[in-house]
Image (cartoon, grey):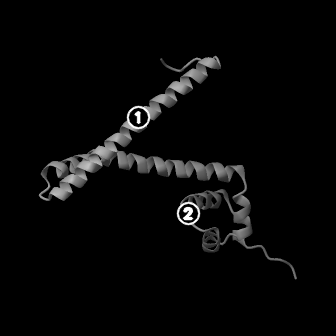
Amino acid sequence: MGETTMPDETPNQDQRDQFAVAMAMGQKVSVWAKKNGVPRRTCYAWTQTPEYKVAVRDIRRRAYDRAVGHFARNLTKVADRIALLATEAQSESVQLQAARVLLRESLNVREHVDLEAQMEDVERRLDERDGKIPFSS
C-alpha cells in the first residue's frame, strides 16, 4: 500500500510563523499541531531550529515591550491614586496602607535607579579598559 501525501504534510512558512507565535504565547505543541493539521513530530523538529528560537524570543520580547509600554502609560495614574488615598481616604488604615506603599515603592525605584547608574558606570569602565570608544559622553 502506498502512502498518500496530504497537503498539510508539507507546512509552509506561514504555518511555521503561526506556530512560533502560538508557542511564544504558551500554547501546547500537540494542540496547535492537531488544530493546524501539522504532524507533532514536524512541530517538535521546528522547535530545534535556530530560526524558531530567534522568532520565539523576538515575539516574546515584542509582547513584553508592549506590556511595559502599557504599564508605563498607567503608572502615573496609579501613583496619583495611591497618593490621593494616602492623604484623603476616609479610613486611617487605608491612608496608612497607601502611605506605606508610596514609601516602599519610592525606595524600590530609588534602588533601581542607583543600580542602573552603577551598571552604566561599570560598563563605561569596561569599555575604557577594553579600548572601546563610548557612543556618547
* Tag 1 residue: 113
* Tag 2 residue: 26
Disc nearest the viewer among 2 and 1: 1
Can residue 61 be seen by looking at this rendering? yes
What residue is at 55 percent from the left and 51 percent from the top?
A: 59
What residue is at 19 percent from the left and 50 percent from the top?
A: 86
The picture places residue 92, in percent across and down from the top left corner, at 15, 56
| Frontmost residue, 39 versus 100 | 100
Can residue 132 be seen by looking at this rendering? no
- At label 2, the amino acid type is Gly
Above or below: residue 91 compared with residue 105: below
| Frontmost residue, 56 versus 108 | 108
| Frontmost residue, 20 versus 13 | 20
The picture places residue 137, in percent across and down from the top left corner, at 47, 17
Q: Is residue 5 left or right of residue 90?
A: right
Q: Is residue 40 left or right of residue 18?
A: right
Q: Secondary structure at mark 2?
A: loop
